[in-house]
Amino acid sequence: MAQNEISIATIQRLPIYLDYLKSMTGGAEYISATALASALGFGEVQVRKDLASVCSSGKPKIGYHVEELKAEIEEYLGYHKANNAIVIGAGRLGCALLGYEGFSRYGLNILAAFDIDVSKVGKMENGKPILSMEELAGFCRRENVQIGIITVPAVHAKQACEALLAAGILAIWNFAPIHLDVPESVIIKDENMACSLAVLSTKLAKKLGENAAT
Amino acid sequence: MAQNEISIATIQRLPIYLDYLKSMTGGAEYISATALASALGFGEVQVRKDLASVCSSGKPKIGYHVEELKAEIEEYLGYHKANNAIVIGAGRLGCALLGYEGFSRYGLNILAAFDIDVSKVGKMENGKPILSMEELAGFCRRENVQIGIITVPAVHAKQACEALLAAGILAIWNFAPIHLDVPESVIIKDENMACSLAVLSTKLAKKLGENAAT
C-alpha cells in the first residue's frame, strides 16, 4: 500500500539517503532525522516524511537504526532483485553506461549494447558484447531483458524505441533529447540533460544579474 | 519578477516544449495548449501555467505564436548567452559530454577537460584539450569559465569540487553519485543517475508484481 502512495520526488531521494548511510563511518547504530537532514541539506520534515513511507523503525529521540534503514530502503528500491538491461547505441554515452560498474549496486545488470553501425558490431566493451539490431529481439527474450536504455542521437531514437517495443521490453530509460511515444503499459523515464542544464543556466543567469547589480 | 516565481519543475519542462516546437514541421503559425499537452503527454492546465510564466503572447482560441514562443523560451533559458564550462574527469562520461555537440544549442560551451591522470593530459578529445589539474585555476580565470562539470568517480569528487571552488567557479553540475558541500553562493545541480534509475526500478517492480498477480 505504501508503494502506491510514495511520490516520485521521494523515490528519487531514497538513493541519496542510502548513499549517505553507506558512506557513514564511525559505527553509529542510530541516526536522527535531524542529522540526516543537516548532512544532506534537506528539510527535516521532508526527511521524516520520506523515511516514514519506507520504514517503520524510527524511534522518538533515538532515530533510525542505520542497518535496518539501509535494508528497508534497498528492499523498497528492489536493489536485491537484479533487472536485466541492454543499451541501444554503442557511442560514448552508451559505452560509459556499459562500463559503469556502480549500476550493479542498484540492481541494474547491463548485458550488452546494440548498434546499427556494423563497424562496432562484434566488438567487446568492458567485457560486454556489441551486437547488431537484428539480434535484439531474440537476445531480449532469451536473456529475460526488462529494461532498454536508449543512447542514440535524437534522429534515431524513435526507431530504437520501436525496436525495443517489438522486442517486448517493459521499461525504457531514454537519454535521447526527444519525446518518445510508448503504449501505456510501457514505463518510460526520460533522462534529458537539457532539462537539468536549464535549471543550472537560469539560476546562473539570475546570479550573474544580481552580481552585476551590486 | 516572473523569474523569481517559476518553479524548478517548470524550468525543467521548458526545454521539452522548445524541442517539440523546433521539431514541428508543416509550418503552422500557431499552436494551442491542448495540442502541446497532447503531443507531450502533459496536462493541459500544466502547459498553460508553464507557458504563462515565460510568455505573454498566448491568445484565447488561437493559441501561441510558434516563433514568438520559441524565442521567449530561449530568451528565458539564456540560450543566447553562452556559458563557458569545463569538465573535471576525462573518463568515458567526461569525454561523452565533451563530444556532445548538442550543448551549444543550450548555451553551454565546454572548452576543455581536466584530469589527474598524466597519461591523458596533453591529448585532444573532439578538438578540445585535456589539461592537468594544476592548470585549472589559471584556465578558468583566463577563459571566464562559470560552470564546472564533475564526472570523476565518487571517491575523487570532493577533491574535484574543492579545486573548482578554488578556481572561482560559480556553478557546478555534479555527475558523481555523492553529496557535495558547497558555499551558499555557489549553485550546484546533482545529476544522480541512481535517482532516475530508482524511479524506473520501483515502477517496474510494481508492474512485474501486478503481472504476476493476474
Image (cartoon, coloured by chain):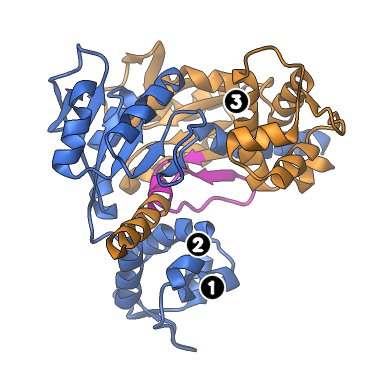
Chain colours: A blue, B orange
Q: Kindly check if marks 3 and 2 are in contact, taking CB atoms under 8 A apart as contact.
A: no
Q: Chain of mark 3?
A: B
Eye-nearest disc, 3 or 2? 3
Q: Secondary structure at mark 3?
A: helix
Q: Quadrant of the C terminus of chain A?
A: top right
Query: What's the CA distance linking mark 3 and mark 2?
Result: 28 Å
Q: Is disc 3 in the same subunit as disc 2?
A: no
In the displayed structure, would residue B116 be above or below residue A121?
A: below
Instruction: Check disc 1 and report the residue beneath it.
Output: A49
Q: Position of residue A150 (x, y in %)?
A: 36, 31
Residue at 59 percent of width and 67 percent of height: A43
Residue B96 is inside the magenta segment: no
Residue B193 is inside the magenta segment: yes
Q: Secondary structure at mark 2?
A: helix
Residue type at numbered disc 1: Lys
Q: Nearer the viewer, residue B103 or B209?
A: B209
Q: Is residue A197 left or right of residue A119?
A: right
Q: Secondary structure at mark 1?
A: helix
Q: Position of residue A105 (x, y in %)?
A: 25, 54
Residue B13, picture quadrant: top right
Instruction: Check disc 3 and report the residue beneath it.
Output: B19
Find the magenta span and give its range: B173-198
**Is residue B136 among what the camera can see?**
yes
Give the mark nearer the N terminus: 1 vs 2.
Answer: 2
Instruction: Check disc 2 and report the residue beneath it.
Output: A10
